[in-house]
Amino acid sequence: MSANYTTRRRAVTGLRFGLLAVALVVFLFPFYWMFKTSVEPTDAVYGDVGLLPGGFTFTHYEQAFSVGFHESVINSLIVAIGTTVLTTVVALIGAFSILRYRYPGRGGAAKLVLLTYMFPHVALIVPVFYLAAQVGLLSSPIMLIAMHTMLALPFCMWILMAFLEDIPRELEEAALVEGASELGAFARITVPLSYPGIIAAGTFAFIMSWGEYMFAFVLMRESASHTVPVALHQLLGAYAIDWGLLAAVSIIATVPVLALFWLMAKYLGEGIAKGTGVV
Amino acid sequence: MSFADQFAFRDRLEGIERKGTLIGIALVTPAVALVLVTIVYPFLNAVQISFTDLGTGQFVGLEHYQWLVSHDGFWTFTWYSIVWTVGNIVLQGAFGIGIALLLHEKFFGRDAIRTVMLVPFVVPTAVTAITWRWLFNSSYGPLNYWAVEFGVLSGAVNPLTETSYALATVTLVNVWRWTPLVALVVFAVLQTIPQEEYEAARVEGAGLLQEFYHVTVPHLQGSLTILGLLGVLLTFNIFDMVWLLTEGGPVGVTTTLPVFIYDIAFNLQNIGRGTAVSVVLFLMLVAFVVAYFQQEEFKGGTFG
């Protein structure tokens, strides 16, 4: 039985690597294909289905510039950075408040914020559009930053609460004994000690905001205010779709978040594990 | 610590208690205010608008809702939403658990694979949608070219523009995007299963399948019930992937309720009816959550 058993286990190991390789190809091939298309001359885009690029050119990237795609990149940077800063600050002080203070309504406030991710956000597009139109915030980054912060807040607060729980209370109390004010102790002890959580929350908020399409599409009506995902979709609606250009702008849209993800993967992984509480 | 220090410390702590209430409330206020401004107020406003004719500002009672239930499209689109949601949950669950099991045993490079697998999730949905539209392109896309070349298809077909395949294709692309995340969450749950239980099973001569049924499955059940609930809620509300791939077409076969909301409110410019569908969608999900928690598993359990 033992020999048979070992052979079987070995076969299973081989099968495991085979299937994982297939999965990786399935998940990564589409992006490789997009990259290949983005660097090919136009005649190769519409004629060549080989696995390697049929030639090499930056034409499509230059064209992305000439159609003004960089303006949407700037818009997206404003929204994503605004969202990241706002979410991180609001989530951090909120998490600190819920974990360290006792006051009436504390449990209710925690539930209200943390459970919003279960709310059907699509049910908000009509009233939020209506609200923005009434207060003159259509096509303004302010309303979109508020919506994106709302989307990122519950998860970021989960992450930060998990990190804050790990900071020994004694350290904060020691600072208080030495004469620091409460907010001083928070700023000098708690914030520096929870920086892995802050990085994880910030990274999550940035990636979410950069890629968010629904609220950006509904709220950013003027073309000068379009964020990257909305601008991408606009190019797709053009009379004659230029796939080389679309591939190039797709790569431009992907690189910032992919780079950020790559740099912060360690923190993000730890944050997701802690925030979801399954590890 | 001297007596004086201890005294000061006590004083400090009492200080926290007293000032704490105000500081605590002040620190949580931005988060609560944000939720009130971005969710609670707009949604209550939507409920109000759904009973109003925005043109005249008059209360019209259930008019928008009556239009909705008598509109054939509404029931069809609800059905598409259900098909979309069930298809997504079943396939993401199956593939996600499968991949998690493949990753379960330690091997060199496993952490790298876990990181790389998150790429589809990090990439903006708009890029994903454009990429798949290009891959499916009937004239220049590689999938059609290879399918014809290897004799799988007799002629090129773009499944996103075919009424019989569009909904299934949109579902599959969404499954492609979410499966890695499901896999990683299930993987994290698998890691919490004590190794001894597998060893004990092996000592008793259990094969891989028996190991799976007697050790893995019982440990997964609790997490999967929660994941399933969240998955249904998130998937039912997805607008971006469907809209970016097909805009609800061809001839409406991929119009799920979120796309329907957009169509009525923005393309047909009927805010009143749009909010009525939004409210109904919200109520459907509340009903679903209530029904879900009525299940046997929750009775007397941690969530009961």
Image (spheres, grey):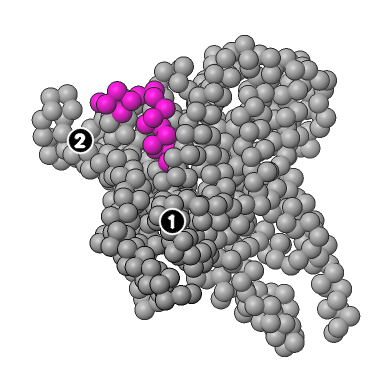
Of the two numbered discs 1 and 2 in the rendering, the one whose residue sits closer to the viewer: 1
Q: Are marks 1 and 2 in contact (CB under 8 Å)?
A: no
Q: Bin the neighbour count of mark 2 within 10 Å (Cα to Cα): few under 14, some 14-19, many 20 and up.
A: many
Q: Is residue A220 above or below residue B288?
A: above
Of helix, strand and loop, which one carries label 2?
helix
Q: Is residue B154 visible?
A: no
Chain of the residue on which disc 1 is drawn? A
Residue at position x 83%, y 67% in the image: A11
Residue A228: x percent and y percent? 54, 27
Residue B228: x percent and y percent? 48, 60
Of helix, strand and loop, which one carries label 1?
loop
- The boundaries of the magenta stretch are A132-149
Q: Nearer the viewer, residue A100 or B43?
A: A100
Residue A175: x percent and y percent? 48, 60
Tell me whether marks 1 and 2 sit on the same chain: no
- Helix, strand or loop: magenta stretch: helix
- Outermost residue, right direction? A3
Q: Which residue is mark 2?
A: B49
Q: Amino acid at mark 1?
A: Ala
Assess whether residue A205 is covered by the magenta stretch: no
Residue at position x 46%, y 61% in the image: A178
Q: Is residue A33 left or right of residue B25?
A: right
Q: Bin the neighbour count of mark 1 within 10 Å (Cα to Cα): few under 14, some 14-19, many 20 and up.
A: some
Look at the image and tell me in which quarter the C terminus of chain B lies. bottom left
Q: Is residue B117 left or right of residue A180?
A: right
Q: Nearer the viewer, residue A164 or B51?
A: A164
Q: Is residue A87 visible?
A: yes
Q: Is residue A69 left or right of residue B23?
A: right
Q: Amino acid at mark 2?
A: Ile
Q: Which residue is mark 1?
A: A180
CA gap, disc 1 to disc 2? 51 Å
